[in-house]
Amino acid sequence: MTRTARLLMFAVAGGLVAALLVLGVLDLPDFGASDHPYRDAAVPAAVLHKTSNVISSINFDLRALDTLGEETILLASVIGVTVLLRPASDEHEHESISGSGRLLDSTKLMGYVFLPITLMIGFLTIAHGAVTPGGGFQGGVVLGTGIHLLYVAGSYRALERARPVGVAELGEAIGAGAFACVGIAGALAAGAFLVNSLPLGAFGDLFSSGTVLLLSCAVGIEVASGVVVLLAQFLHQTVEVTEEHGQ
Amino acid sequence: MSVYAYLVAVFVLLVGAFGIVRSRNLVHAVVCLSIAQSGTYILLLAVGYQSKATPPVFGSPATKPTKAVAEPLVQAMALTDIVVSATVTALLLAIAVQIHKRHNTVDPNELAALRG
Amino acid sequence: MNALIVITLTLVAVGAVAVVLSDDPARQAVTLSVYGLLLAGLFMTLSAPDVALSQIGVGTAIVPLMVMLAVRKIRDRR
């Protein structure tokens, strides 16, 4: 349909949806009210499992099955991108030309200075998932993006050598598999899939809350590898694949 | 005035949808989809907010656990959703790149006119 | 309902309109990055530091980077 017809239809349908949503929203509990039944159930359960970070407890302990599903979506999307971004029939791959492009010295310096700091922050965020804000998802994202500071600091070749894509793909599979394995180990040890079966430790310690730390590391590896593979596919397409008769 | 947060969430969702409908470029449409998704995060977190409550993290060394914290369940949902939807956005961008390779255009109006 | 939350909510609404109305996808990547920061600020005022951390990493760094790479790939082939 034409663009004006589309906009007209959106005006009608969007107006209707907006009216319904506003009516629904007016019936919600007051913003900032203290009536939160899930919180009243989740916080005592997390404290029982000696986890200081209640959100990590929900993600990796109380509702770990959901996280397994989310991880699988991530895996499937990355596989989809890898399959989609193949060179087309009229393109060829070539090695990236090193040293091409202008780069400010200050950018290079910032890249090299921040690379170890960012990687360390990523590892710390994953490892402290059970006690401070953080966890596998956030730390994995920081790690995955941090390694690309090598590319920002000037060298695609250095990035390729630092993160061979095969290793990243393997890392992703290992992360996803490790999550399922910890779950199966819980089933064998204590009778139900993804049960928190390791020793729980003391509230607020780094090595507390049993399997939350393990699952956080597994998800961290998977998310970091997933981000690296995604960016590798896009970078490969822009830097190393060109049209046959192109500009 | 206390429904302002929910209204902003609904507004952002509809603005994102409007952007998709009005878009002349598939990459622009994908970014607008990402905006619409962020509207849902705002709604989730607004539902879980409690005034004068702390975040649901007790830290290390741990403070005394109390029940006067924000709702942790919606935060857990929003957190995993943000990361996963970024990878789905990557998938959509890859589809847009492939469409450009096949049909040499990323304008939705021109694409609709192509016959097989 | 304090003033800080109202201000961040309004900024987020304005940011969303700005992203949707930027027609050039290359410009939109930058606006999206700024919107990601505004959103992270909103999440912090709503007592959600975990979600803010996630949003900064993803919405400010990864998604704009991929949008820029996609735009560059499409432009190179034109």
Image (cartoon, coloured by chain):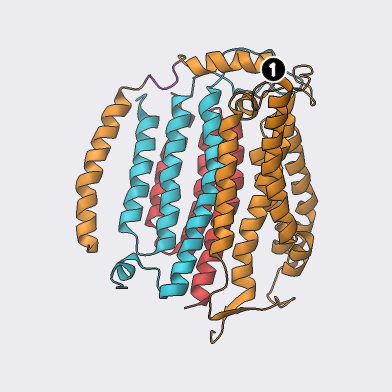
Please state which of residues A69 and B18 is positioned toward the viewer in this rendering. A69
Q: Could you tell whether A53 is left or right of A88 in the image? A: right
**Does the magenta-highlighted stretch encompass residue C40?**
no
* Residue farthest to the bottom, as pictured: A245
Please state which of residues A38 and A84 is positioned toward the viewer in this rendering. A84
**Chain painted in red in the figure:** C
**Chain painted in cyan in the figure:** B
Q: Which residue is mark 1?
A: A49
Q: Residue at x 49, y 20 (%)?
A: B50
Spot occupied by residue A133 in the image (x, y as percentages of width and height): 66, 31
**Chain painted in orange in the figure:** A
Q: Main secondary structure of the magenta part?
A: loop
Let me know if residue A143 appears in the view: no
Magenta-highlighted residues:
A29-33
Secondary element at tag 1: loop
Q: Residue at x 58, y 46 (%)?
A: A74
Please state which of residues C47 and A180 is positioned toward the viewer in this rendering. A180
Which image quarter is the C terminus of chain B in?
A: bottom left
Q: Residue at x 40, y 45 (%)?
A: B36
Tell me where residue C13 sits by quadrant: top left
Q: Amino acid at mark 1?
A: His
Q: Is residue A136 above or below residue A132?
A: below
Q: Chain of mark 1?
A: A
Spot occupied by residue B32 in the image (x, y as percentages of width and height): 41, 52
Which image quarter is the N terminus of chain B in?
A: top left
